[in-house]
Image (tube, grey):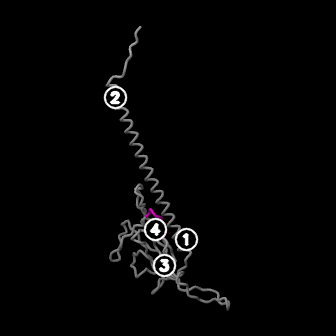
Amino acid sequence: MIKQKHGVTLMELLAYITLIGIIGTLLTGTFILGIRTYDRVNGEGALDQEANSISTILYSAVQSFQPQYIRYCDNGNEYSNCVELVIDTVWKIDEATGILVQQEVDEKDKYLRIWINPEDNGLYINSARINNEGYQVIYHKIVNGQVDENEKDSYISYECNIGADTCQKFTLRIRLALKAEKPRYRSRILIYESRFAY
């Protein structure tokens, strides 16, 4: 008895190739979508974490510094990129007499400067940058003392409650627009505010 051998016809081969191509395309698209979603979620989570880190550092620095008054650096305007918290004198016990006396503060301990550097999009406390590399604080120069609240923009301002020449009781407002610089993280711009009352 002779057995007949059957092969695959050309039509069947083309059908198999087409079916494999369709399945491969669907799997590739799903894989790419998964990677993009992971990058977006990972980027937004990292941005939130960076914002929390900045907020914690700011809170710690501002709360540990007990200023006598506040002012804008270099005669800045209401929506500035720089403020200085200032202590001129402190009360200390004189070691020789044991009496409480008012003493001048050393120049290095006199100021707590909070500022945004538009050149490198960094937020600084004195000379230390507090936002990590890879994240930028977006700052645009303010024209004629005006800022659009709808703009994705950062600024530092304060509202004076008591004080004529020097603002002694105030509410400090720090508004930050934070963005990841990493090209693979197409993250949103996160805007948040911190307020400190003295």
Give the residue pinned by disc 2: 15
- Which of the two discs, 1 and 3, sits closer to the camera? 1
Residue type at numbered disc 4 = Glu
| Residue at numbered disc 1 | 60
Tell me the crowding category of disc 2: few under 14, some 14 to 19, or many 20 or more residues within 10 angstroms, Cα based: few
Tell me the amino acid under the disc marked 1: Ser
Q: Does 51 sit above or below residue 29?
A: below
In the image, 74: left or right of 67?
Answer: left
* Nearest to viewer (mark 1 / mark 2): 2
> Measured along the vertical axis of the image, is residue 114 above or below residue 47?
below
Residue contact between numbered discs 1 and 4, judged by CB atoms under 8 Å: no
Q: State the image coordinates of residue 107 (x, y, percent, origin top left).
A: 52, 84
User: Which element type, helix, strand or loop, lies under badge 1?
Assistant: helix
Mark 1–mark 2 Cα distance, whole angstroms, equals 68 Å
Considering every residue shown, the one lying at the far left of the view is: 11
Distance (Cα) linking label 4 and label 3: 16 Å
Q: Nearer the viewer, residue 61 or 69?
A: 61
Q: CA distance from mark 1 to mark 4?
A: 15 Å
Read off the residue under disc 4.
193
